[in-house]
Image (cartoon, rainbow, N blue to C red):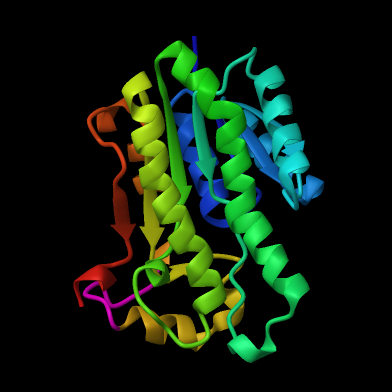
Amino acid sequence: MSKTALITGSTSGIGRATAEILATRGMHVIVSGRDATRGEAVVAGIRAAGGQSDFVRADLRDAASATGLATDALRLGGGAVDVLVNSAGIFPFGPTADTTEDGFDTVYALNVKAPYFLVAALAPGMAERGAGSIVNVTTMVAEFGAAGMGLYGSTKAALVLLTKSWAAEFGPAGVRVNAVSPGPTRTEGTAAMGEALDQLAAAGPAGRPGTAHEVAEAIAFLASDAASFVHGAVLPADGGRIAV
C-alpha cells in the first residue's frame, strides 16, 4: 500500500517539485495551496505521469484552516497521512519600522502557526502507527542576522526550534522530524529578486542559485526510509552558504 504525503505550498516552486518527486517514488501526493487552478494543474501533471495525486485548497491563515486541511488529507489518505512537508511560506523583506501588525501576523500565521497545528493534527496519528516523517522547510537566514530579513528569518528560526522539539516529542514513537534549509533558490516566488538573487548566491561555494528540484531532492531524502536514522536535523541545501 502506497504512503500518503501532504505537501503544503505545493502549487509552485519547491513544494511543487517535492510533490512531483514523491509521486514518482510511489507516494499518493496531496497537493495544497491557495490557487485551485495551479493546484489542479500540478495534480493533472502528476496523474499524466502515472502518479497518484489530489488537490485540497487551503489558505492556512489560522489554526482552523490548518486543522481543516489535515482532516481533508486524512480522508483522501484513507485515514492516514504518512509524510507531512511544511513547505508553504511567505518571505517579505524590508525594514523593521515598515512592518505593520497585520503584516507581522500574516507572516507568523503561515510560517509558524500553520505548521504547528498541522503537526498537532497529524503527528499523533503517525505516532499511533509507529511511523511517519515530517519535513519543515526553513531558510539559511534563520541562522544568521541579515538586514531587512528579521521578520521572515525569525519565523523560520522558530520552525528550526520546533523541528528539534517535535523530534524529541514524537521521535520515540517512530516519527522522524527534520528540516531542509534552502539558500537562494530560483523559483516563481524569487523571480522578482532579479540580479539580487544571483548576488546573494555568489557568496556561496556553488556560486549560483539552486533550483527547486535540487532543494526538493533534499526534502525527499529526509521524507524517505533512506533517512531512517535521521532525527531533528537541519539539512542545508544552500550551495554551501553555511560554510562561508
Going 48% across and 87% down the picture, which residue do you hit?
195
Q: Nearer the viewer, residue 92 or 41?
A: 92
Residue 151 visible to an observer of this rendering: yes
Name the residue: 38% across, 52% down. Answer: 180
Residue 23 at least partly seen: no
Q: Is residue 68 left or right of residue 176?
A: right
Q: Considering only vertical position in the picture, is 21 above or below 51?
A: below
Q: Position of residue 167 (x, y in %)?
A: 36, 37
Please determine whether, in this image, residue 110 is positioned above or below residue 146: above
Q: Position of residue 169 (x, y in %)?
A: 39, 32
Left or right of residue 64, residue 128 in this image: left
Magenta segment, prevailing SS (helix, strand or loop): loop
For the point 58% across and 33% down, which residue is it? 120
- Residue stretch in magenta: 203-209
**Percent x, y for residue 126?**
48, 20
Rendering coords of residue 68 (x, y %) = 76, 33
Quarter occupied by residue 19:
top right
